[in-house]
Amino acid sequence: MEQYLIDPQQTQLQTTVISSTATTVQFAATIIYPGGGGQPLDSAVIVQGNHRYQVLAAERTATGIRYTLDRPLAEPSLPVTQIIAGAVRTRNTRYHTLLHLIAGLAAREYGCVVTSNQILSDHARIELQFPTHAAKLAFPLADFTATVSAAITANHSVSARIVDRDALQNEQEEVRTLVSLIPAAVNQVRLVKITGVDEEACAGTHVASTRQIGAITLKAKSKGPLKLRLQAVLTDSANAD
Ligand SMILES: [Zn+2]
């Protein structure tokens, strides 16, 4: 059970170990985001009695998420408590939602597609590919920053739903296209929607509405004839919610 998908603000969870080998471990439930979609692995520790273990790495496997700890668990048969760094999670969640907003608005206003994105400790970056070199040259950064800021202030709600691949004929064409890009072996797809702006497949953590992103700045850097890299910074240091 990936609890971070249900409540991205939960920072502590008691659970059990369902399998472990040396320093790797799988839990019955988890609040520790394993990384992916440009959002890094959470800063997390596992507590068991007087022992604290650092979570060093995570990978998604066919049977769930496997975490690597700094040393083997003393008692794999006993319950453990997961604790994540809440401020880091909140910041990553705000940046992650901002990246959706930028992607959706850049697609709608300028026909851009996103070729990569990444959240770092003090900024996030997103690479936009324009349909033509002329479109890239004409990109008005100040206007776009104002458009993104207005969408944040408009407080669009952010929601997620799970779609069964089998039930797709009932979905709108945009959703069918989105899901067709996901490997056929994946039966269920999580779609994250910013109402009125963007919907995309994503298994990351998001704020509940866009005003929680807070104030931003954007800078642009050319990355070849068609691409711009935007550097986004959240300028409200406090959690805006
Ligand atoms: Zn996302």
Image (cartoon, rainbow, N blue to C red):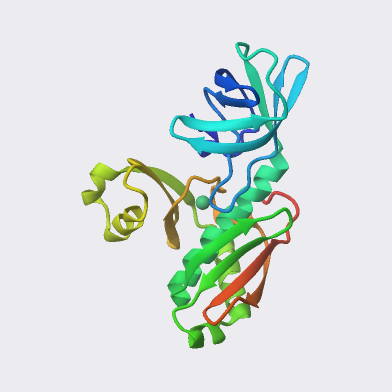
Q: How many labels does the image show?
A: 0
Snapshot quadrant of residue 11: top right
Residue reaching furthest left? Answer: 169
Q: Residue at x 78, y 16 (%)?
A: 50
Q: In this view, does 72 lie above or below 130?
A: above
Q: Which residue is drawn at 42% across and 61% down?
A: 196
Residue 26: x and y in percent read: 55, 25
Snapshot quadrant of residue 138: bottom right
Snapshot quadrant of residue 117: bottom right
**Res. 154 visible in picture:** no
Residue reaching furthest right? Answer: 50
In this rendered view, identify the residue nearer to me: 219 or 10: 219
Q: In this view, does 199 lie above or below 71?
A: below
In this rendered view, identify the residue nearer to me: 177 or 25: 25
Residue 77: x and y in percent read: 60, 11
Q: Is residue 39 above or below residue 152?
A: above
Left or right position of 170 against 70: left
Residue 59: x and y in percent read: 55, 38
Residue 219: x and y in percent read: 67, 73
Left or right position of 39 against 156: right
**Res. 42 visible in picture:** yes
In this rendered view, identify the residue nearer to me: 23 or 229: 23
